[in-house]
Amino acid sequence: MLSLSQPCFSGTLLMLLASNFLLWKNVAPVPMYASLDEYGEMSIYDLLDHVTILSHNVSELTAEMHRIFMEDVRYKPGRWFSDRYLTACHTSTLTISVSKEGARQMPGVFLVKEMISMLTAWRYPLYHIITELSYMEQAPDEIISRARNIEEKIIVLIEALRGILSKIQPGPPENERYPVWNELASLQSPDEDLRHLTLFNLFQCLVKDSRKIDSSIRLLKCKLLYNRDC
């Protein structure tokens, strides 16, 4: 059974964590990317196949992680989480749909930018999911390993989507803006139930967003390869 009781940290470690939090807290906007060399030689077709596989893997991993968490925590005596406890996802402002503004852009450009924003918005909370679970007693390795795998794949997926964007909208890179997650205090709370609830919300939102990304990439592939409404 997952226990979210946390060991005491030394003053030095707490200072390092506080410093790390300040570095991560204000991460939007950020420079777009360092290099696209890895994807420069790939065709748009190969890139689309690449992101399709990646997004499907991420979607499957998030579903598995959510299932393991629910099996380990949700049915613990005295604890029950239902959808009525859910708070709005920090990515809820990103609709991943083609608005009037998006319709004026080249096919797929708006969609790619929205997906990059959503995926980037998950890097900070995923980092802290991994960090906090690593400190918690009896946290299932299956959850931590999947969270690390998801984090790694999301980084690669972001870079691949940036590669696609550079091909369909050539030019200098833009700055990216994305929603910032602000629930770190709840994840680090001394209240065990609040920590469980925060993880419950995060996993629910991550499952929802990974499915959006997966379906949006299929839509993107249809738009770019067949140039039609899909």
Image: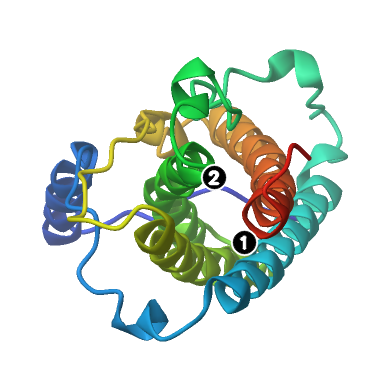
The disc labelled 1 sits on which kind of residue? Ala
Determine the residue positioned at 55% across, 28% down. Answer: 194
Relative height, residue 65 to residue 4 (above, below): below
Circle 2 is placed at which residue position?
108
Q: Image check: 109 left or right of 227?
A: left
Q: Secondary structure at mark 1?
A: loop
Nearer to us in this view, 188 or 102: 102
Residue 117 appears at what percent x and percent y?
A: 41, 41
Q: Which of the 4 image quarters holds residue 184?
A: top left
Indicate the amino acid at tag 2.
Gly
Q: Nearer the viewer, residue 183 or 228?
A: 228
Q: CA distance from mark 1 to mark 2?
A: 40 Å
Q: Nearer the viewer, residue 17 or 93?
A: 93
Determine which residue is flagged by label 1: 139
**Near-viewer residue (219 or 140):** 219
Q: In the image, 60: left or right of 158? A: right
In the displayed structure image, the side of residue 70 where residue 114 appears, left or right: left
Instruction: Indicate the secondary structure of the residue bearing disc 2.
Output: loop
Residue at x 58%, y 27% (from the top left corner): 98
> What colour scheme does the image use?
rainbow
Residue 23 appears left or right of 133: left
Q: Is residue 211 above or below residue 42?
A: above
Viewer-side label of 1, 2: 2
